[in-house]
Amino acid sequence: MLICMACASFLAGQVVHPLAYYKPLALLEPMASRVPADRHSISLAVGAARTASYLTAFVGGTILILRVRRGRQQLVEALSGYLCYVTVYPIHSGGREPERSLGKAVSRGFGVLALVAFAILED
């Protein structure tokens, strides 16, 4: 994800700098009067690079969250037919009782200290 952020940042800076240098893009007031005129293109390029980096991180983080959540749900679905009793002890439970359901523990994102499961043996 960091490589994607760096590439997006580099490309955004390379695209915006010439546009700002040849004046199709310009700083708006009050920033235009605060930044020296010869630095306007650099300022816009840096702003575009930072924005691209943040946007890439947001999109990548969202994709990562969704993939992890889907993987956890698939794990619960795969194990649901084999588990008859589950005790999950969260590391930081905040005074809560141990979860009796693997689905609840996984969906809430608890750090698992101990997981005890008894499998149903098929004959």
Image: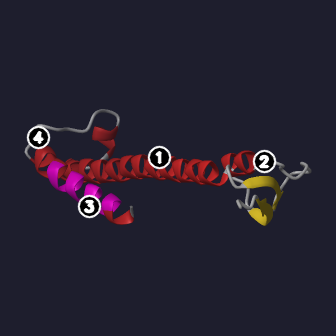
Q: Amino acid at mark 3?
A: Cys
The answer to if 57 sits in the magenta stretch is no
SS of the residue under disc 2: loop
Point out which mark residue 101 bears: 2
Above or below residue 20? Residue 11 is below
* Mark 1 and mark 2: Cα distance apart in space: 26 Å
Residue drawn 78% across and 48% down?
A: 101
Magenta region, residue range = 4-15
* Mark 3 and mark 1: Cα distance apart in space: 18 Å
Point out which mark residue 7 bears: 3
Residue drawn 26% across and 61% down?
A: 7
Above or below residue 98? Residue 34 is above
Q: Which badge, 4 or 2, is on the more N-terminal residue?
A: 4
- Judging depth in this view, the residue of 119 and 44 nearest the camera is 119
| Foreground: disc 1 or disc 2 | 2
Q: Amino acid at mark 4?
A: Lys
Whether tag 3 and tag 1 are in contact, CB under 8 A, the answer is no
| Quadrant including the C terminus | bottom right
Residue matched to label 4: 23
Residue 108 placement (x, y as % from top left): 70, 47
The answer to if 5 sits in the magenta stretch is yes
Q: Amino acid at mark 1?
A: Thr
Furthest toward the top, the residue is 29
- Judging depth in this view, the residue of 101 and 120 nearest the camera is 120
